Amino acid sequence: MNIVWITSESHPYAKTGGLADVSLSLPAALATRGHKVSVIMPYYPRQMAKLKLKFHSRTEMLGVPFGGQTEWAQILEHRLDKNLSYYFIEFNRFFDRDGLYDWDGVAYPDNGERYIFLSRAAMQTILKLKLKPDIIHTNDWHTALNNVYLKSGLYRNAPNFANCRSVLTIHNLGYQGVIDKSNLFWTGLGWEYYNFLCLEFFDQINLLKGGIMTADMINAVSPTNAEEILSSGYGFNLESSLQHRAAQGKLRGILNGINIKEWDPAHDNRLPATFSAEDLSGKAVCKAELQKQFSLPVRPDVPLFGAVTRLAHQKGIDVICESLEDLLIHDDIQVAILGSGENGMRDWLNSLAARFPNKLGVYIGYDDSLAHQVEAGSDIFLMPSRYEPCGLNQMYSMRYGTLPLVRATGGLADTVINYDPASLDISTGFVFYDLYAGALSGTMRWAAATCRKHPDHIRAMQLNGMSKDFSWDHTAAEYERLYEDAHR
Ligand code: ADP
Ligand code: GLC
């Protein structure tokens, strides 16, 4: 198939979270399976200039109808393989910024315009490059409008789209692109699209809703999340739109895979020592180095909890802080947290670290190498998420012999099997259910006690996790079926 994948971010070019990981590894997996994949995303000069990418081609100007006039962008092609190219839309007014979506925790006020522009530019790119997609694959609110465009009079009759259907992957329903209805002007669409079966949502535009209502197929990124989002607790006020599409048989849940080359403890040159299931000795070196990096006492015996996370409400950081208020007073544990995001959570973590410097180390920022080091050097990896559509870190942890401690939600529930001494052959981590500080601290104490009293059980769980196959080989085929169903 000819697949056009449209995204707001992709590793290694620009990343804030798991969408970037998926936008690197799933297109590659599909290309390996013989599909021709073209990825379209913005060119973010401040994040990408340092990569010194070689562009295979640079088009003459791309005209993008926008707000009643034509804006001029450029398409930069970075070819990875004969079946896989990344096309970057260069348009500095919108994409030459210090952050992708926000700066210092405050969202850019023109995010609606910026990503409406990306969607429109992507459609124009398809025309300009004479691509004839069988599938347009969109991701989250930023590119959901492409599903609407494909069905609209602006594009549906263009020969390029004659055999094209669209798929929307919902990586995170918590972010929807809700903007003032006056922004309809930027889309070039008429008011007939502003109704409750398309873009309208409580008298505003909801870009994600437009995608949900018009995509030929929709998927969430884990089977459990595909069910959760139909309920009021996890539906973020879009549950009835999703129920409507689910009743038509248009909603699936497909668990994300991980890039097992990028995340491989046996060949990871970001680590002070490599290791594998056969020889775990390098993991102790990683733990000692991690303790040094976070200015914690170097002690092999103390249970070390790690986290790598966006500092967002979604991730239960407030619950971590509340638990630590108690644990750091009473318990002999260490915690190393790498995160960036909301200022309130940052400040709370920093103040805890200042009070308990021998027990808690906090690094505020975004650091890819350090993320790998936290995965490798920790004993236990914390993910007490409020909701977690899939989550990649728990799978990275298992690959690195680090036991995930998770709340049973979304992809966390689908990937981590709770510790049970009676079924040690399958256990892979620690699971809790209710989101409050006592539940998390109780589970952390349980995990710490297991590290001390039952190192053999810990070892068995490490090996279980390390032998799991979370690679895309497993799940890329499910996307092929999704694409076929989009054509039915
Ligand atoms: P989400 O997409 O909701 O943030 P995921 O678990 O799917 O959650 O993916 C998060 C990705 O972002 C992982 O690759 C993780 O290592 C990375 N990440 C998150 N925060 C940081 C950070 N501060 N520094 C480096 N990497 C980070
Ligand atoms: C989102 C979700 C996360 C998921 C990622 C990739 O950001 O929060 O759970 O793993 O997208 O699909």
Image: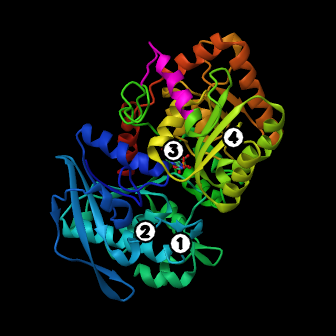
Residue at the spot 53% in from the left edge and 73% down from the top edge: 108
Disc 2 residue lies near ligand 2 with CB under 8 A = no
Q: In the picture, residue 407 is in which quadrant? A: top right
Secondary structure under badge 4?
Answer: strand
In the image, 424: left or right of 137?
A: right
Q: Is residue 384 above or below residue 10?
A: above
Q: In the rendered structure, are the residues bearing label 1 and label 2 in contact, judged by CB atoms less than 8 Å apart?
A: yes
Badge number at residue 221: 3
Camera sees residue 226: yes
Camera sees residue 237: no
Residue that badge 2 annotates: 148
Q: Which segment is the magenta one? A: 274-290
Residue that badge 1 annotates: 199
Residue that badge 4 annotates: 360
Identity, as a three-letter code, of the amino acid under mark 4: Leu
Q: Tag 2: Cα neighbours inside 10 Å, few (<14), some, or many (≥20)?
A: many
Expressed as whole percent of the image width and height from the top left, the position of residue 330 reads: 84, 33
Identity, as a three-letter code, of the amino acid under mark 3: Val
